[in-house]
Amino acid sequence: MSGKLSACIFGIVGFLIVLTITATSLSAQSIEEKTQVCAGCHGQNGKPVDKTIPVIWGQQQGYLYIQLRDFKRGDRKNDSMQPIVSSMERADMLAIAEYFSKKPWPDLGQPRAPKEVANRALRANASVGCTGCHLDQFQGDGTVPRLAGMSRDYMTKTISDFRSRARGNNPGMSDLMLATAPDDLAALTEYLAGL
Amino acid sequence: MDKRSILAVALAGVAGILIGPVFAQEVKQEAKSISGKAKISSVSQDQLNKADTNANNFLLTNGNYAQTRFHPARQIGRNNVKNLHVAWIFQTEVKESLETSPIVINGIMYVTTSFSHVYALDAKTGAEIWHYKHKMGPVTTYCCGPNNRGVQVLGDLVYLATLDAKLVALNAKTGDVVWQSDIADPELGYSETMAPTVIKDKVLIGTNGGEYGIRGFLKAYDAKTGKLLWTFNTVPESSVGVWATKDATGRDMHRDIQVEKDQLAKTGDPYQKLGGGVWQNPAIDLATNRLYFVVGNPSPDLDGSNRPGDNLYTDSLVSIDLETGKYVCHLQYIAHDVWDLDAVSPPVLVDVKGKDGKIIPGVIHAGKTGHIYVHDRKDCSLIRFSQAMVPQENMWVLPTKEGARMLPGANGGVEWSPIATDPGQGLAYAINLHQPMTYHVENSPYPNGKLWLGGAFKVIPGEAQAGNITAVDYNTGKIKWQVKTPQPMIGGILATAGGLVFTGEGNGKFAAYDSSSGKELWNFRAGAGVNAPPSTYMVDGKQYVVVGAGGNTQVDFRRGNNIIAFSLN
């Protein structure tokens, strides 16, 4: 476990301790204050502290909302996220999702894929039809996430989790990932990270 | 960040989360008037009823209530179409998949774009009159692109259905919202891309969502108030049917009926999440007050294991009563579909030769299978089906985990693209895709409104794709002519009394063909995919042809944002 990741988890633990001892209304808090806890893992400047953690700055509002909802429902499993969302209501989730969706997408400085990798990725896209949902330039919309410029390690982990169905809140994605060759998925990951 | 600051951050986070609802959704609409010079007139029901004989206007999405897409204007004909040139180009704000059917009313054009924008334009100059930009809700769940296929006008209201599953009535003069109704919950996979159909006091609307485990419907709303009048569920509570083992053309679909019956005994009728979207407009028989529409695929698309039975009325032509929404008749093309080769292209009402050779009221539909099906309008029964317009191979091999090759691919044949007809010639014109695919099956439980394909359909890399424009004699089922195109075709087609058909391709080519022979007579390169149905109309005695050139998400054709109108010198 990296130092940053352990610090991120420590922050969540601290958050949970505070959560249990705080029962009074905190209605004066601004959205910036409400979302401070997120920065512990997803980054103060939008760059996650660990490469297996997704970018949420500039991500689609609908997608962020659905993930928060699914963490709360237990449809998506994550030991860090589930305690955080457990007390959230729908309006909280929508507001937090909107807040982050309006932040600028951070440049993670990932290299552009070499031409042969990009070509393989585009062939895979033409076959499976990723852009049918993720749209032109992989920018996403609504409940479909932006993939362009997402952390390569996060995408690798996510694809692996879809293939094993460890990530269970989108079986349609699992089906598509299982129908796509691992080498094609690796090319897609490298290509998307560099966009 | 050190540990103390992390704790402080956590404390601040708690404060945020305990605060409760932190934002109220604001539904703010935007409509702006720029020129306001063109005179916007209202549309009467009588005008809509007679749209098929109105050479000046293009009043409904598919031309008229019979949806013939045959327009009586004849100023542009076979002899002079070579002189067609650009009259104007209007650039929309949205450079994304463009599937709009422009409608034109007394010199005013209404077009839509992806993400549910509406523009009112001066049809003579292309000048913008107003622009309505729908304030999209945060949750949209849709398949195949953020498309919108158009609006309809009745009286002084313009009707739009939106990606976040709302029905909106706009003031035709200003673009301001008059009323808005929720059609269904987008969080459960419902969305809208079709144009509403308006008749008398009713706005008719279907739904997308067959890829998300919805229960499909066609609904009627009060045109003045937006109040729901009736709902026809496209999947009845008893969806099992007759355990058909053959498709409408008589081919074996390789169903294991006993396995399905065992599943039915175990899990019951799967009607609640069985899909059955209605992607395109109903045709309306004004003499009988009956609607004819087609219903899309069952959910999940490729995995039939959890949905025993015929999955009525998916993959079917259905007729219901306009006043009550009550069922009249249906014909299912493919029972228990596991290939997504469903019914999407809007049906057309024309008189056809019945089985005994006598002319009777008919209804025709072009399927993803590549056949044009000809029905008796009275009872929906199938009279004949056409020769296949695209290669068919290995039908109906069942999908496998590794992928089974079968033609047509899952986009068709004929996708959502409306066909055109020329009743005088007895011809139907369809545009087709040829995309070799493998069909893969996986099993997963209902995912609460998420994508639910039950597998994947994959274009086979390296295998040539193509398209075609095909004219079919619907009284014999024989292909009269066919023009091959280098890419799969999706968008739509128009026939005119000038003896022409107009259609576009993904490579940007927009062309006119002799409707009797298929000979190409004129073409234009639009620079972006022409994947929308053309319309035609007249202003001040001059005929125009108009089409959107904005590419397509589903087949990934080059995007653009142009509405292009053509006229003669």
Image: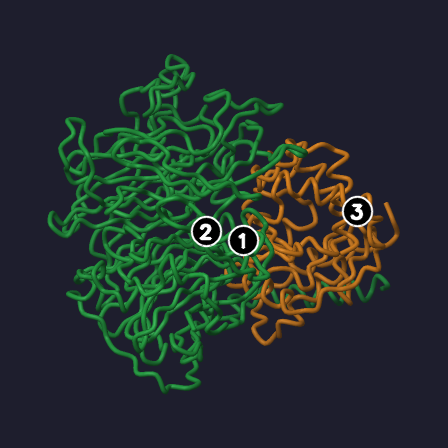
Chain colours: A orange, B green
Q: Position of residue A25 (x, y in %)?
A: 56, 69
| 1 and 2 marks in contact (CB < 8 Å) | yes
Farthest residue, direction left: B287
Say above or below: A80 vs B25: above
Farthest residue, direction top: B258
Q: Which residue is denoted by mark 3 in the rendering? A: A190
In the shown orientation, is residue A134 left or right of residue B569?
A: right
Q: Amino acid at mark 2?
A: Gly
Q: CA distance from mark 3 to mark 2?
A: 33 Å
Q: Amino acid at mark 1?
A: Asn
Q: Circle 2 marks a residue in which chain?
A: B
Marking on residue B552: 1
Occupied quadrant, residue B48: bottom left
Q: Residue at x 58, y 68 (%)?
A: A24
Q: Position of residue B355 (x, y in %)?
A: 18, 27
Q: Circle 1 marks a residue in which chain?
A: B
Q: CA distance from mark 1 to mark 3?
A: 25 Å
* Residue B234 appears in the figure: yes
Farthest residue, direction front: B79
Relative depth, front residue between B239 and B321: B321
Badge 1: how crowded within 10 Å, few (<14), some, or many (20+)?
A: many
Q: Residue at x 42, y 79 (%)?
A: B125
Relative depth, front residue between B292 and B25: B292
Q: How many marks?
A: 3
